[in-house]
Amino acid sequence: MSASAADIGPEVRDPFVEEQFDDAVQQREAATFGMWVFLSTEILFFGVLFASYTICRVLHPQGFAIASRRTDMLFGSIETAVLLVSSSLIALALRAIKLGRRRLTVGLMVGTAALGICFLTMHGFEYHKEYTEHLIPGIDFMQTGRFAYEVELFFCLYYFITGFHSLHVLIGVSVILVLALRVARGAFGPQRHTTLELTALYWHLVDIVWIFVYPLIYLVGRAG
Amino acid sequence: MSAIDAGVVPRSFLDRDYGLFAWLTTRDHKRIALLYALGITFFFFLGGAAATLIRLNLITPSGALLSAETYNKAFTFHGVVMVWFFLIPSIPTTLGNFLLPLMIGARDVAFPRLNLASWYLYIVGGLFTIGSLLAGGVDTGWTFYTPFSTMFSNTNVFLVVIGVFITGFSSILTGLNFIVTVHTLRMPGMRWFRLPLFVWGIYTTSLVMVLATPVLAMTLALIALERGFGVGVFDPALGGDPLLFQHLFWFYSHPAVYIMILPAMGLVSEIIACFVRRRVFGYKFMTYSMVSIAVIGFMVWGHHMFVAGISMYSSLVFSLLSFVVAVPSAIKVFNWTTTLRKGDISFEAPLLYALGFVGLFMLGGLTGLMLAAPALDVPLTRTYFVVAHFHYVMVGGSVMAYLGGIHYWWPKVTGRMYSEGWARFAAILMFFGFNLTFFPQYILGYEGMPRRYHSYLPQFQVLNILSSAGASILAIGYLLPAVYLLWSLRYGAAAGNNPWNARGLEWQTTSPPPKENFLRAPVVREAYAYDEPAP
Amino acid sequence: MSESRFFLPEASSLAPQIDWLFWSMIALCAAVAVGVFIAIVFYCIRYRRGSPADRSGRRKQSLGVELTWTLIPFALFIGVFVWSLFLFVHEHTPPANARTVYVVAKQWMWTMQHPGGQREINTLHVPLGTPVRLTMTSQDVIHSFYVPAFRVKQDVLPGRYTELWFTPTLLGRFPLFCTEYCGLDHSKMGGSIVVMRPADYQRWLAGHDTAPSLAAQGAVLFRTRGCSGCHGANASVHAPSLEGVYGTVVHLADGSTAIADERYLRDCILLPRTQVVAGYPPIMPSFSGQLSEEDLLALIAYIKSTSPLASTEASP
């Protein structure tokens, strides 16, 4: 179709369609597909951490069980709820923009971002609590007892996993806030919301990863 | 023959926006390809300089030229630069970037800005790596095995790990871009089984890049954190597992070998079809074999660890899968050979490089079979046998193919012809220089000389001298194209749009192509339609 | 060493078997390579541009041909795999009567400890014709124990035991290399294996019999480090007796069983909670970080010496 574009000439083209694409449909397909490929990459990023966790856990089941009980399940559970609600808010925001309700969209997106910030704040409290309990390997780790090394190993993984996840939440919150601003300025509408949709996809991935992190870190050690 | 009517000479992508700023902010895939080519050539010669030091040092058994410390840093630098800053990006980001949109009839890749961002990431990663060199060098080997890299090395591991980490993102984003481009931007009529095999090579490589590189990036991040904080998952003192690092590292680094070789396989198919003037024999089997290499390649990483302390049973499973992944490579060699049959063969320089590729790749692949058998891998691994094996595949294979591709598409990219005589001479010189360099290393490995040795027992000296002599011939072979290709930019004859009378879509536009790639829609037919006249 | 400069001596019972596979593979690879080269050269000459050769039927694609050269290599590869499988399993199965020598690697030296307490640095004396089993560990980074003339190689890791075995079949001195890059003097971390006639070997052992045997060193540690307080005959604490435990099947608290080999004993000393014996409370403290690798090996040698299996093993 390169010919058709050249024959028509750039002046008639949809200004929102970049020049490598024939039309808005193709552009949308490419962007969506690209996002899915990116998400598969993300899964492999987290896959390394989950694989390491699994292997260390199999090697040291008791130490990991003890360490897992040192995490704060109340915070962990509330964080899970907060993330799940935020994911549904952004899904509603996507529906709102499709219906053309711009102010509602902005509200829902700001809500999503607020819950994300809420999640990060709670994590901050958690980290601080662990700091006062001398549970941060490499910075302040003072534990004694038979499983001190295994507990340290667990907390290494705990910080890698939750830290890397929180980084994703932070990126998600920033993107959502910027997009909310652009929605407010009318950059998106019922016919033009691919960026919002892709951001929602990303946010759902961040949520899904947490659904795996939560039981691995907070719950498994407490069973039995 | 030309798609452009006489009298209308379009401005090429080079012939506009000359300023440095215009180049550094370009979103044109062809210009980005040239930006990459500059970086990659620079790193190739940088890594080559390290290789020169290594070979010079090994002329005497005592390693008189370098201290052990400098030698260790030299082979580490050689490995890191050649793997991550030359071999992995080489074909995909230069020829792939330039040709992929042309070959599928698109105006650009799907995400041009991302493409430029990938180049910047590559450069920033490269700067970190050069920074590590300036900060005194790194002595871990390119494999960063723990706990040496995390707890024992006193060098600047952090900088180089960050450099490779950043470049990893360049790789991921490039792969993502190409996958989406092939899926969504093929022009009407360009069905999957009409794609040139080079596109298939780039596509399958991109799959591997996207799915394997994150594992490397995360593993290196864990190394950096472990070094920074003094604790981590690979630390045996905490009950962590140093073998876990090797599993994760090879989960990337074995597929990485296929990242290097798959584009080369596709590229060689293009060249052979053109100069033999017939369709590649077994086109569909060629595509199936690429896809199966990419998929099975993810399941064979354990064959790097037969003596590392993994269980006997897992060794055997990895061994079986390694034999399975060798089958598609064998199919490809047989298909290339059979393509020559009933052809109309003309021995221009690109074909010489391509035939060199087939021969050297086959020797590398066959010795790979020996290493896939665990009983033989035990005595041979970690010796010069392995060094020779992977240089045959990566240097004899990928680099020969890359140079062949540069010669084949040079007229398309620059609009100029190089000196055919010099190009043939360089190809033949490289072939012989290469064999003289690396064949003695097979024998050295069989006789038991371990790799990464700064000094060695006197009985290994004769073969080492042969290898170093070969390396000096090889070095001249690699310098020659740098001279005559640059020379052709100014003095070479005008190439015309299709000097080889080839059939890919890229030959239907002008040389060099205009910014929009095609001013008139190219004609899409079956790939390699050499029995029909050019459109 | 050997009369030939080119061929590596076959100095162990494994070496000829591995060489058989090696040279068979070389022959197979050479046959394939030569075949393909001849085909390439032949086609290149016959079908060079302008030659009068017949080129009809060139568009034909053949599924049969493709399947042939998919399946034949596949069958060949599986054959090689099966051959290699048997050999590899053999490489991993030390004979029951093998003598154990303990090896501790550190940057950049090898320490070998014979059961009789003889210690060597970078040299290992072994008797001709007797299987030798090495139990190896590292104090710092990963090393690798490689004797080309024996065709054996095994990585040596910190924090765990790995092992290899060989039966020397040639007298002489054979080079030993470290083949896992381990830092500055990696290339200097070598030595030699000296294969002696059994009688000479006995003389050598006697001549170097200065230190008490490894088991005796272990017995001292067993008392001084407090092991005997719980595991000794008169202990009041409820802990399993270790006399004769080596090589037996141990029932663990989680219902599983383990064989009390060197790795198990090491784990019990360093990570006691991971493998608690059924019927005993998990009260043993970890000795991780308190015992050197040499001390650990001496303790294990002592526990082994109390086992009936030990008598068959330690006798030359």
Image: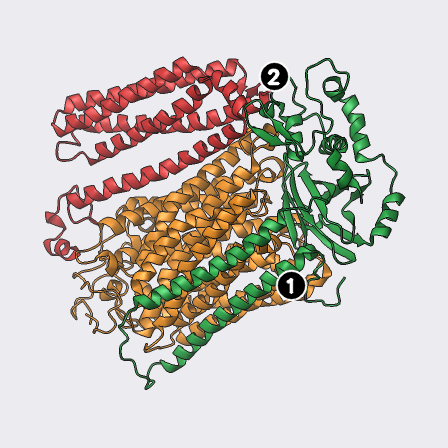
Chain colours: A red, B orange, C green
Read off the residue under disc 2: A144
Q: Amino acid at mark 2?
A: Thr
Alpha-carbon distance for marks 1 and 2?
55 Å
Chain letter, disc 1 residue: B
In the image: residue B525, left or right of residue B21: left
Q: Quarter of the image holding residue A83?
A: top left
Residue B251 visible in the shown view: yes
Give B23 or B324, whichever is nearer the viewer: B324
Looking at the picture, does residue C288 appear above or below residue B146?
above
Expressed as whole percent of the image width and height from the top left, the position of residue B97 reads 32, 54
Q: Position of residue B153 (x, y in %)?
A: 62, 39
Q: Amino acid at mark 1?
A: Asn
Q: Chain of mark 2?
A: A
Q: Which residue corresponds to the image point at 32% horizontal and 77% vertical from the top-left? A: B342
Quadrant assignment for the C terminus of chain B = bottom left
Indicate left or right for B153 with C235 as reference: left
Q: Residue B451 in the image: x percent, y percent?
A: 62, 54
Eyeballing the image, is C34 above or below B442? below
Tag on residue A173? none
Q: Which residue is mark 1?
A: B464
Up the image or down, B85 lies above or below C266; here it is: below
